[in-house]
Amino acid sequence: MKTRTKILCSFLGIAFIAMILGFGGIVPTSTLVGIGAAWALIAFSNRAAQRLGSVREELLNEKAMSLSMMERILHAMDDHIYVTELETDKILFINDSMAKDFNLTGDVKGESCWKFFQLGFDKRCDFCPKRKLEANPDEPVVWEELNKITGRRYRKIDRVIDWPDGTKVHLQQSDDTTELAEALALEKQSKSELITAMKLAEQGNRVKSEFMSRINHEMLTPMNAIMGMAQIAQMQSDPESRKECLDEIAQASSQLLRLINDVLDMSSIEGGAFTLTDSFFSFSMMLQDALRTVGGYVNEKQHTLILDLDPSIPISLIGDEKHLSQVIINLLTNAVKFTPENGEIRFAVRVLDEKDGIVTLQIEVTDNGIGMSKEQQKKIFSVFEQVDGSPSSKYDGIGLGLALSKRIVEFMGGAIWVDSELGKGSKFTFTCKLQREHANFAQSRRPTAWIMPTL
């Protein structure tokens, strides 16, 4: 309003001067009017220019204040935030939190974002969300990243915003979710482990129930045989018939004793109380006793037993005779059990190595029986497992023999394994370490002959 008043006053002043000059006839009236109008326009233009300059300066100051306020707000945030140009990827702003975590100490404005925030890129990243923003700038892009520079996991939100200078820019906000991701992963793992533990516990309970059912049957069978044969023997007056009953009782008693020993040994091993008892023994005598134990079963199924013994086996050794014999009997018994009648069983012993008085033996039991599948071989040495553990199985046993044999062999510094093919038989092999007896003692304990028992 003041400006228009000043212009009007100037115009009227000029008009007054023009009237005086016109009446005086000095200057034509039309010329004076033109000069007045020009003067007024010049004055108006000067005033307008001054006003526009003032407005522009005010706008710039407002934008500067707006940008400064925006930057202060973004710097105060804990999330990582940076702003880039949409087309060039040039950095316009990065907040203090992000600069600190990425170890950025200098001014990075004007540099490409992928140069400082990613590894292995010399141009825009393959996974850059700007491509999606360019296609749909109104829709924020939410994604996750494991950053190779910080080694942290982030949840990112990229969007297009209006910057204080009026341009469209790209803003990325990143929230560090590393601890949350680790907690979720740990929770998932704990749930998985809990489910696995529950399944194992259920399986363990099932297996133990089946084991108790089988051991009940396996113990009752020889006990019933002992009691029955004892009653029959009492009624017999013929010495020969009574002797047959006593032989049956002795065999059933031996079977029951082996079963009890297996259970007690496995209990000792599981409880950490199992130990080997070393003593001097004759390998040949021990083997004769073991073969005599299984001889009745071999004859009953009319099997052929082939012995293949290394002549370099020491005559006398130091070791746990009882448990070595136990492993051999378990393997031979299984071979007899799982081989149909008129089958063939091969028992072989080799000296693998001898060093500093320690003899390593390799013992093999091979049969041409029913064999095993690959799946059965994986679990055959587990406690309470059987080749055929179904209730309808025609094979007796409690599923301890091979598991116990494996533990004993390992205690003796050896290993045990199986090679088998379903329908074609199995070969069980184990090694053990024994000490050679001193020659002076061995000579006095040498057996008179290598006598094999009658099978």
Image (cartoon, rainbow, N blue to C red):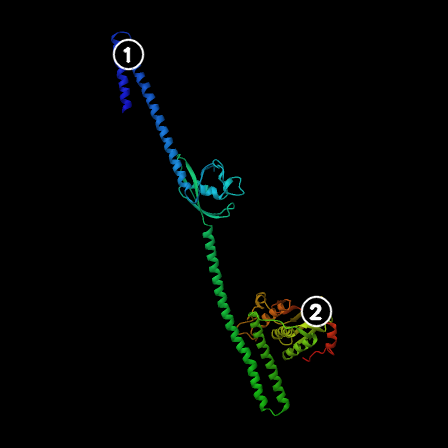
Q: Quadrant of residue 299?
A: bottom right
Name the mark nearer the viewer: 2 or 1: 2
Return the residue nearer the eye: 73 or 393: 73
Q: Quadrant of residue 8?
A: top left
Return the residue nearer the eye: 286 or 199: 286
Crowd rating for badge 1 (residues with CA inside 10 Å; few <14, some 14–19, many 20+): few
Residue 225 visible, this angle = yes
The kind of secondary structure element at disc 2 is strand
The residue type indicated by label 1 comes to Ser
Q: Quadrant of residue 96?
A: top left
- Give the percent coordinates (x, y) of residue 384: 55, 71
**Which residue was labeled with disc 1?**
30
Which disc is residue 350 wearing?
2
Contact flag, marks 2 and 1 (Cβ < 8 Å): no
Residue 371 visible, this angle = no
Instruction: State whether residue 152 is above or below residue 250.
Output: above
Of marks 2 and 1, which one's residue comes earlier in the chain? 1
Instruction: State whether residue 410 is above or below residue 256.
Output: above
In the rendered image, the quadrant that contains the C terminus is bottom right
The residue type indicated by label 2 comes to Arg
Crowd rating for badge 2 (residues with CA inside 10 Å; few <14, some 14–19, many 20+): some
- Give the percent coordinates (x, y) of residue 283: 69, 74
